[in-house]
Image (cartoon, rainbow, N blue to C red):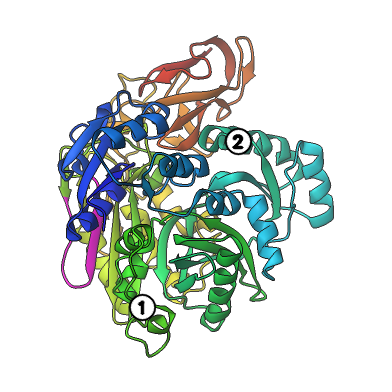
Amino acid sequence: MFRRVLIANRGEIAVRVARTCHDLGVEVVAVYSDVDAGARHVALADEAVHLPGVAPSDTYLNASAILEAARRTRAQAVHPGYGFLSERAEFAEAVTGAGLAWIGPPGEASRASGDKIRARRLAESAGVAPVPGTLEPVHGAEEILAFGVRHGYPVAIKAAAGGGGRGLRVAASPEEVRAALESAVREAEAYFGSGDVYLERYLPRAKHVEVQVLSPAPGRAMGLGVRDCSLQRRHQKLVEETPLVRFAELGPAIGKAAVAVANACGYVNAGTVEFLLDADDGRFYFLEVNARLQVEHTITEEILGVDLVASQLRIAAGEPLGFGADDLAPGGRLAPRGHAIECRINAEDPSRRFLPGPGRIRRYREPGGPGIRVDSGFGEGDEVSSAYDSLVAKLVAWGSDRDEARRRMLRALREFEVEGIPTTIPAHLLLLALPEFIDASYTTGAVEGGALDALTARPAGSRAVEADSLAGQVHDAAPLIVRGTAVRLWNPAIARSVSAAGPAGTRSGHGSVVAPMPGTILEVLVREGDPVRAGEPVAILEAMKMETHISSGAGGTVTAVHVEPGAIVEAGDRVATVG
């Protein structure tokens, strides 16, 4: 086993990897940006290296700085976690080229699976049908319009190098094609360094299912069960569970297909093969391979009793796993037991269309009790930065059956106390009480279909935020009662700087149009002298790896534009003036 491992990541995944390393007697090297100097993952490390700056490009995406940190600290291996450099084949090759072990798939396997178009071709060659779509990048709106004529709408426009819902936009009609293409390309370039996109037929009633795979060597992939990840917002997961309940009879076939795709890619180490399952006809299609450890690997661990990070380390070190496919089969010593559910606790306000809510955590109390696990990178007093992902913690509940796991999750959500930032806990409480969740019939369209309308509606007697400027009076809303739990809809910290959210994003009042949170201006959509309607977006802001449209609260004429693309803004900074 390695003596020392550098973890090229931050937040809860860096904490999670560090804990397994220490369990195995492996020393940990952390890296950290300016704003992460006091972070939990740094405190847990045996040694930590400062990466000057805040922006991901200067810190956690700075491959040369991370390699230099590994050299200086005499690390023997690099664990990338997920996100950042985890799926960059060139970084994996740079690590091994520097004489270090890469705790992930080899560069060529990552390249084969990470390029979504190439992975679709490999899946077809392995006899696994991909979601109907293109096998080449598209180069303009006309190609998308032609695809829509042939296959109908909605059409999914997806980043070829993407994953995790990044660089994915859905055009519901020909009129939405150009804007969706521009947004998908812009996000793909920002997150993956490539603006290539391809097309898929969008399945409006689909289940998003995936198989955890683990491969000690090329051609020896094992399937570790199927997860249902269909509860999503903005095409990113909110809740995951395993094993598969609806269409459970398809589990073995889906697992076999996943292994075939992984082997076709020459996959090694831990990864995930994802599928879309048409809830109307029960057919499933290959979607993509995520060449890394997934956020939701925890629920697979809970039902199998396997530490997947430890397995990653053993594979990278050339050591035996200690188990094989026979152990995972029915009747084997690692056969799945019970049911597990994970809720992603994000710093987002579900009452305002999941508007990101960075800030300082004033109070933080994690739940506990039988069957409850919390993986977190934050604690009381910590700052959740707008520069990075919004994930604060992963809450996992295990039960002997699905209903016990669901009831334990509801109890844990009610016990979880987070103040100072908005969180997705109110959304989770509603989602787990939905009839379609209780009977497992939910699909990827549940949230967009109105499952959380109770959060965005103003309850009787509530007092909503009315703030036309930063000096506006702030009023807290009356709490919403969700199964006996009081959930505050409006977050005062955000309300002090912006007005209530509108359908297109965040609306500012008549006069100044202000940024709702710290972030980077990606695009300015208006010029001085342009007419705007109430609710019309004037700029696009990126914060916490999400795009947010900043909209005008009233109609009028743009009298001034105060920002340009690339500008860094703070909450309340003026973006434009409408007169």
- Between 359 and 100, the residue placed more toward the observer is 100
> Residue type at mark 2?
Ser
Distance (Cα) linking label 2 and label 1: 41 Å
> Residue type at mark 1?
Arg
> Which span is picked out in magenta?
365-377
Residue 407 as seen in the image, left or right of residue 530: left
Question: Local crowd at mark 2 within 10 Å, few (<14), some, or many (≥20)?
Answer: some
- Between 130 and 64, the residue placed more toward the observer is 64
User: Judging from the image, what secondary structure is the residue with disc 2 in?
Assistant: loop
Residue tagged 1: 402
Q: Is residue 499 visible?
A: no
First in residue order: circle 2 vs circle 1: 2
In the rendered image, which quarter is residue 338 located in?
A: bottom left
In the image, what residue occupies the spot 62% across and 39% down? 184
Whether residue 277 is situated above or below residue 561 in the rendered picture: below
| Location of residue 179 in the rendering, given as x and y in whole percent from the top left corner | 67, 35
- Between 346 and 427, the residue placed more toward the observer is 346
Q: Which mark is residue 187?
A: none
Residue tagged 2: 194
Whether residue 184 is situated above or below residue 265 in the rendered picture: above
Residue 350 as seen in the image, left or right of residue 444: left
| Location of residue 182 in the rendering, given as x and y in whole percent from the top left corner | 66, 33
In the image, what residue occupies the spot 20% across and 60% down? 24
Q: Is residue 525 visible?
A: yes
